Image (tube, rainbow, N blue to C red):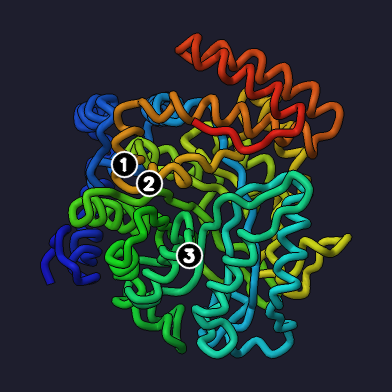
Amino acid sequence: MKYDVRSMKAEEFINDEEIRETVKYAEDHKDDTELIDSILEKAKERKGLSHREASVLLACTDKDKADEIYDLAEQIKKDFYGNRIVLFAPLYLSNYCVNGCLYCPYHLKNKHIVRKKLTQEEVAKEVIALQDMGHKRLAIESGEDPVNNPIEYILDCINTIYSIKHKNGAIRRVNVNIAATTVENYRKLHDAGIGTYILFQETYNKKNYEILHPTGPKHDYDYHTEAMDRAMEGGIDDVGVGVLFGLDNYAYEFAGLLMHAEHLEAVHGVGPHTISVPRVKHADDIDPSKFDNSLSDDMFCKIAACIRIAVPYTGMIISTRETAAVREKIIRLGVSQISGASRTSVGGYTEAERPHDTEQFDVSDDRTLDEVVNWLMTAGYIPSFCTACYREGRTGDRFMSLCKSGQIQNCCHPNALMTLKEFLTDYASEGTKRLGDEVIEREIHNIPKESVQQIVRERLVKIVNGERDFRF
């Protein structure tokens, strides 16, 4: 098969021969200073790079050029997303699964893991626990099981999540990370008011993919890889992609990931809303050392920087799979969203102590949400709980057009400050509250329009007096 970015066939828009030629080209030119400089000059235009150009930057071994890559990635992130970091939490609904994935403890052959599925009453309790931390945005997770976790169950859970209003809490955006499904089911998710549909590819190497998924519906590489096209056909504007780094050669995965983004842009006029960069981690009966494709923290950070340069408008997510130290290092290189106080077990948020019996992976950053918020502010970022774009209809190509023009910051910066003030007022410790008020006062002056500054100040007073959910 030949490479065709506009093809609707997985093996043509994620073409193995093209990826291998790209990786070889990058390796052959990794010390070509003139080529690398020309690619960096193109990247400075903030219009992105091709998968082949970005692969050359990833392969480059010159330390000075690597520093240029990191600095450019940091600046591009600031240009489009400012110093805001959006916070969210995963919510695991069920670990029943019929697949045989070799890297996931939910696989069907695992007979000693506790299987659990939340009732709607239990979903409500989880949501209240998350609201009481201060979360406004969730990503729901579920194993693939048509009997235990049918689409109707997922839709009921979404309805329950949106219906819960506890004290001043509310979940304002529900992102969905469930198995590849039909156009009809994607329409149902769209109609239920979801935010982003997220599906990790795990690996773009078809041969290895089929080995890693020996049984179950997920074994079908083409159906899985073409899921984002069906989701967009079903009306979902915002989709999130990602690979599980460590399952295959990172250079191969990097090229495939960018080719997927290029395909979505070419066919649908808008690339992925988010790109996630998880790594294989220990969990129950899963030993990550069995996958002989591990990558160093330094290369992991370089991958993030090259993704930011290649797709400057796309959000990037780093989860609590990574340690606090790695998250602190990688966050400046292009990350725009992080999870906080995550529990990857089914029903984990209502437990006083973090349960481990149903975890999908070990959490490496176990700080509380208050501690994460404090850390971000100390590091010079604005923790944001904003969901305004989704709720104002600024999704898909509408979001991207605002982002590409730089206008999105006129909405996002004040929205971030107002949602941070909600968190400080309702949930923060005294130390975090004092620091947050200082951050807000300083950052108000970075809002370009004085009239908007005044509106924000007025709304901040209203938030202290009990009003909620202001947005631009």
Asked if 323 appears above or below 455 in the picture, the reply is below
Residue 324: image location, x then y, percent: 69, 42
Residue 251 in sight here: no
* Location of residue 109 in the rendering, given as x and y in whole percent from the top left corner: 61, 90
Of 404 and 425, the residue lying toward us: 425
Looking at the rendered structure, the secondary structure element under dot 2 is loop
Q: Name the residue carrying label 1.
A: 398
Q: In this rendered view, identify the residue nearer to me: 363 or 286.
A: 363
Mark number displayed over residue 395 = 2
Is 54 situated above or below 20? above
Q: Which mark is residue 192?
A: 3
> Which quarter of the figure has residue 218?
bottom left
Asked if the residue at tag 2 contacts the one at tag 3, i.e. Cβ–Cβ closer than 8 Å, the answer is no
Q: Which percent across, then down, holds residue 87?
A: 61, 43
Instruction: Say which amino acid is labelled 2.
Output: Thr
- The reply, left or right, for residue 37 in relation to residue 389 is left
Q: Position of residue 16 (x, y in %)?
A: 23, 66
Tell me the distance, in whole angstroms, between the alpha carbons under discs 1 and 3: 20 Å
Q: Earlier in the sequence, mark 3 or mark 2?
A: 3
Residue at horizontal 65 percent and vertical 86 percent from the top: 110
Q: Residue at x 55, y 52 (%)?
A: 173
Q: What's the residue at 30%, 62% (across, down)? A: 232
Helix, strand or loop status at disc 3:
loop
Q: Are marks 2 and 1 in contact (CB under 8 Å)?
A: yes
Q: Residue at x 81, y 67 (%)?
A: 355
